[in-house]
Amino acid sequence: MSITVRYFASVRESLGRGEDRIAAAGVATVADVWRRAAATPLPPRLLAAINQQHAGLDATVHDGDEVAFFPPVTGG
Amino acid sequence: MSITVRYFASVRESLGRGEDRIAAAGVATVADVWRRAAATPLPPRLLAAINQQHAGLDATVHDGDEVAFFPPVTGG
Amino acid sequence: MIRVSEQPLDPWREIVVHQDAHPELAGRYGATAVFVGTMRNLNEGVAVEAMTLEHYPAMTGRELERICDEAMRRWDLFDALVVHRVGPLQPDDPIVLVAVWSAHRDAAFAACRHLIDELKTRAPFWKKERTSGGERWLEPGKK
Amino acid sequence: MIRVSEQPLDPWREIVVHQDAHPELAGRYGATAVFVGTMRNLNEGVAVEAMTLEHYPAMTGRELERICDEAMRRWDLFDALVVHRVGPLQPDDPIVLVAVWSAHRDAAFAACRHLIDELKTRAPFWKKERTSGGERWLEPGKK
């Protein structure tokens, strides 16, 4: 299986893509997902979600998860 | 001239009338107006206005004023 | 703007009409905070059948204006609207509308709350409700 | 109830439609508190021509539901309604509606304020605005 990685807003635009898929092997945390998928240093104030729920960068990721990265939200 | 006295809500119903007119002579304060016009003891929590503005029972009344008495307000 | 109405009050329509009448504010406000008070069919556990709202006409308008002016001075608002119903009411009838428009929400919430609190403390309205046990004048109630 | 809308949002009509759909609440609530966020034509002194609201569709609904559920547990509310616009917007377009219904105003104001604050902190929406200087993603802004 694999991990689906999604990017939103300025993060998506910086990377030039909205989605990646990476192998789960060797990936333990959300930060690991970023390093493997985005292959750039962690941006300041990067937020993340695992399976559509807010998660810290040190949260544990499992095979099959959807991990999303985005800047601070500005709705409302 | 004279002082117009108006009563509202439960105060009006207790007195059985909505308005009095009294001579200004010998009337110094709002409380004096009540004693002269209503001729009953001051009810607890009685509120008053002079010329449509909130006033204390010790506020000074002048000839020609409209003085109103009413219970605590319950609008909104 | 303030208004006292003997007719049924449609608060949501009042807002639309007010905004349409003030096109100069369109695009300026980012925050609208609104409070609507509605007649309940239950008060302190007793079923309420009807209500009459008495007021002191010569004073009501002045007092509401004063309350609005104070809010406009105290907070950074574009506009404030207060409409209050008087006369006979049925359960579910809207009684009061307070709406404020500002750039940001802090001012909108604070001013809206202040307006309804001041109105309930100072504006000369009195509610008399009718229950199966008869009629009674209300006491100042819960927040 | 929560909803994300790609169509223009008429917040006052949303409230009427919602209330009409819940006749079981008529006469029960005495306090309705509403917040509407509207697109401004000026941000930090710069004229804004247009805006795009991006969101994370799979997450938005869940997060808004979670925020509403939390408010319903924390305060004594009869109902809560949150509607959020996404897609392209023009100045003066309503962006978000938060409405809550309760017996008394303390709960209504507190819950309404909490809902919009939580939404602005946690719901996955992002605003990109267009000015004469080009496009930019907004930073979390003033309250």
Image: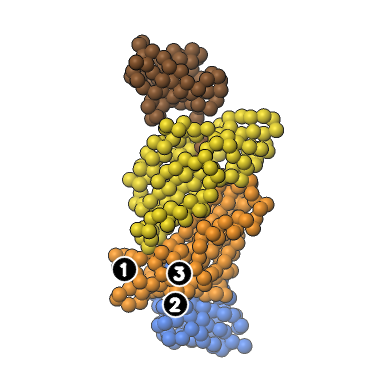
Chain colours: A blue, B brown, C yellow, D orange
Q: Are marks 1 and 2 on the same chain?
A: no
Tag 2: Cα neighbours inside 10 Å, few (<14), some, or many (≥20)? Answer: many
Q: Is residue C29 above or below residue D52?
A: above
SS type, badge 2: helix
Tag 3: Cα neighbours inside 10 Å, few (<14), some, or many (≥20)? Answer: many
Residue A26 visible, this angle: no
Residue drawn at 52 percent across, 39 percent down = C6
Marks 3 and 2 sit apart, C-alpha to C-alpha, by 9 Å
Residue A19 visible, this angle: yes
Q: Measured from the top left, where is residue C33 in percent x and y? A: 46, 53
Which image quadrant: the N terminus of chain D? Answer: bottom right
Which residue does the numbered mark 3 point to in the structure image? A73
Which residue does the numbered mark 1 point to in the structure image? D47
Residue drawn at 37 percent across, 45 percent down = C71
Give the chain of mark 2. A
Mark 3 vs 2, N-terminal side: 2
Give the chain of mark 3. A
Q: Which disc is residue A9 wearing?
A: 2
Taking depth in this image into account, of A38 and D17 the one nearest to the observer is D17
Query: In this image, B65 relative to C54: left or right?
Result: left
Query: In this image, D133 relative to C8: left or right?
Result: left
SS type, badge 1: strand
What's the residue type where badge 3 is placed? Val
Marks 1 and 3 sit apart, C-alpha to C-alpha, by 22 Å
Q: Are marks 3 and 2 on the same chain?
A: yes
Taking depth in this image into account, of D96 and A50 the one nearest to the observer is D96
Give the chain of mark 1. D
Q: Is residue D88 above or below residue C13?
A: below
Q: Measured from the top left, where is residue A24 in percent x and y? A: 57, 86
Which image quadrant: the C terminus of chain D? Answer: bottom left
Q: Are marks 1 and 3 on the same chain?
A: no
What's the residue type where badge 1 is placed? Ala
